[in-house]
């Protein structure tokens, strides 16, 4: 008998046994007569619940309101707030059955007491989130009748009509909002979208012209008009309005941003570049907008393979304007990393952690960048600082120990891994397996393969799905030419998990090479090289070894030369390259 199935069946039977008497008790409770004493107790409990809610103690609020409801299930206010509390506990997840059941509890009070506007609005909003738009609209209409000049209610009604694709009624509701609140770009934009849905281009243009007529020199209105004309393909008219906006407020960074987007849309890269730069150096454009613009601009120049240094100049200008903004430094770091300048990227990240030493993510990124740049001493120094400031971040140990490993300070690496294992939670199998596997790598480097393989086995016993440990275990088994069948099985699992990972493909190739299956080895090493994003000396050296085994000496020599270009200090590689070159000369 399947154990997992049997266990599930037992649990189901137990739940049924418990649920049946519970259902009977609930039915009995509904038939119970509610005494005046119960009503008073419920009212008192509800008052206490409200106090707890106002203090932000949500769990206490929920328990008390649930208790109040058990005493007086007929009290619609108590039922409403129990439904509300359950709604919050569903994390507003509309797929949760608790969500819709909670809304049903709230409805009774809303229908009995339409004068309670706050409760009605909350209930209507919940229905909108649940995509029960008709029900939300029903309640909003009742509120509109009671509060005919409530702009907020009328706007919600208009948006509900738009969601129901009833665009004529949506426009009429937006008109009411404009009459009471006045004109705004936000409302006109909503009306334009409704006109567009009706394919009424004249109506959309008329709406924007009416808005502009109220304040012809309003920059936001001119920008909105320009953007709309561009959307309708009227490029010349669009540029006229964008030019006007810039003329009225020449220092407004938003006008340069709008024109940059215009030129980007029509493919004018020269003017796109010019307007973007002007937007970024503008002193009145907020930092968030600048970061977004700069991200788009940097992405654009990366795609264009720009080498003029324009983006770096802009970053430096923005850093001078906003020296304490970590967002700009972080983005600069990402940009430099994308250009393969890991050293520069790490320098920018170093500024970020100095500005905000509590940012654990920034510390992790700094360590990763230093490791990729092979600046292991810097990674260790940064890691020590990071742990002092973020002692609970166990991820940091996973960067520091490998850095010691890469500079051959094996005892220090073991020391860090042992410290990591002493502080990591016993239930954190992922990190425990990672650290044990790391210790296994160090033991292999020290030549103690028995201890290493024991550590790998221990790691995989804790976390059988750790592909990193499996890959390294398989590779070192292949190097030691031990249990190659086990190595092939583990390496095969890593390929199934990550079929395009060049490191895993290289290991798989190496296992086949050690088994003497050179055709398979060549197939997988070529896949590894085709998938690598950063050229690797090890991959090309392995490719050369495999080609030599197939008898293709000239091709092997070519691959070893590529490997030596990437690792000029590799003396062992140089010696076998020179030996083969003499044979072929």
Image (cartoon, grey):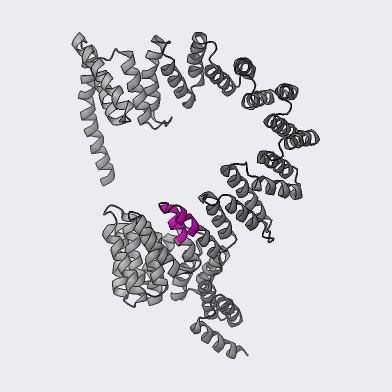
Q: Say whether residue 251 is visible.
A: yes
Q: Answer above or below: position of 180 versus 248.
A: above
**Residue depicted at x 67% and y 25%:** 192
Q: Does the magenta stretch include residue 459?
A: no
Q: Nearer the viewer, residue 542 or 265?
A: 265
**Residue depicted at x 20% and y 9%:** 36
Query: In x, y percent, where is residue 203?
Result: 72, 21
**Residue depicted at x 56% and y 75%:** 566
Q: Answer above or below: position of 183 versus 400.
A: above
Query: In x, y percent, where is residue 179?
Result: 63, 15
Q: Which of 424 and 90 is in front in this view?
A: 424
Query: In x, y percent, where is residue 127?
Result: 46, 22
Query: In x, y percent, where is residue 484?
Result: 38, 71
Q: Does the magenta stretch include residue 363?
A: yes
Q: Answer above or below: position of 305 versus 559.
A: above
Q: What stretch is highlighted in magenta?
A: 349-366
């Amino acid at each position: 008998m399947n154990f997992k199935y049997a266990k599930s069946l037992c649990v189901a039977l137990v739940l049924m046994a418990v649920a049946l008497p519970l259902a009977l008790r609930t039915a009995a409770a509904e038939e119970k007569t509610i005494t005046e004493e119960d009503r008073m107790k419920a009212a008192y409990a509800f008052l206490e619940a409200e106090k707890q809610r106002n203090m932000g103690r949500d769990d206490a609020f929920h328990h008390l309101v649930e208790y109040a409801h058990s005493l007086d299930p007929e009290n619609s206010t108590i039922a409403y707030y129990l439904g509300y509390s359950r709604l919050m506990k569903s994390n507003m997840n509309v797929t949760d059955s608790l969500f819709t059941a909670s809304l049903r509890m709230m409805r009774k009070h809303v229908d009995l007491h339409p004068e309670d506007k706050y409760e009605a609005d909350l209930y209507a909003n919940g229905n909108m989130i649940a995509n029960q738009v008709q029900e939300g609209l029903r309640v909003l209409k009742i509120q509109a009748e009671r509060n005919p000049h409530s702009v907020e209610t009328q706007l919600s009604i208009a948006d509900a009509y738009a969601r129901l694709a009833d665009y004529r009624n949506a426009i009429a509701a937006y008109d009411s909002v404009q009459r009471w609140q006045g004109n705004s770009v936000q409302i006109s934009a909503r009306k334009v979208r409704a006109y567009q849905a009706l394919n009424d281009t004249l109506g959309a243009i008329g709406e924007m012209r009416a808005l502009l007529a109220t304040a012809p020199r309003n920059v936001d209105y001119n920008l909105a008009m320009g953007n709309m004309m561009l959307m309708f393909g009227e490029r010349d008219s669009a540029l006229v309005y964008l030019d006007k906006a810039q003329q009225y407020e020449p220092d407004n960074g938003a006008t340069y941003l709008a024109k940059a987007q215009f030129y980007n849309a029509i493919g004018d890269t020269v003017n796109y570049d010019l307007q973007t730069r002007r937007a970024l150096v503008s002193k009145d454009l907020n930092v968030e907008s600048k970061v977004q613009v700069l991200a788009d601009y940097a992405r654009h120049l990366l795609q264009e393979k720009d080498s003029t240094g324009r983006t770096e100049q802009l970053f430096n200008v923005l850093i001078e304007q906003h020296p304490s903004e970590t967002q700009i430094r972080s983005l600069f770091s990402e940009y430099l990393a994308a250009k393969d300048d890991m050293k520069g990227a790490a320098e920018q990240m170093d500024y970020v952690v100095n500005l905000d030493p509590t940012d654990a993510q920034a510390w992790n990124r700094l360590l990763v960048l230093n490791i990729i740049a092979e600046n292991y001493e810097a990674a260790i120094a940064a890691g020590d600082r990071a742990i002092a400031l973020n002692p609970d971040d166990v991820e940091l140990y996973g960067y520091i120990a490998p850095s010691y490993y890469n500079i051959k300070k094996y005892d220090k690496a073991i020391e860090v891994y042992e410290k990591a294992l002493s502080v990591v939670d016993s239930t954190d199998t992922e990190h425990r397996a990672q650290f044990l596997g790391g210790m296994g790598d160090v033991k292999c480097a020290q030549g103690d393969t028995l201890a290493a393989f024991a550590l790998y086995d221990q790691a995989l016993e804790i976390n059988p799905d750790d592909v990193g440990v499996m890959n390294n275990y398989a590779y070192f088994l292949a190097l030691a030419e031990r249990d190659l069948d086990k190595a092939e099985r583990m390496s095969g699992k890593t390929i199934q998990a990550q079929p395009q990972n060049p490191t895993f493909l290289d290991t798989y190739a190496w296992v086949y090479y050690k088994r003497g299956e050179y055709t398979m080895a060549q197939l997988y090493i070529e896949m590894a090289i085709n998938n690598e994003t950063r050229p690797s000396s090890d991959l090309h050296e392995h490719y050369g070894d495999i080609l030599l085994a197939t008898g293709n000496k000239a091709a092997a020599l070519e691959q070893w030369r590529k490997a030596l270009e990437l690792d000029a200090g590799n003396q062992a590689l140089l010696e076998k390259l020179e030996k083969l070159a003499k044979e072929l000369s």
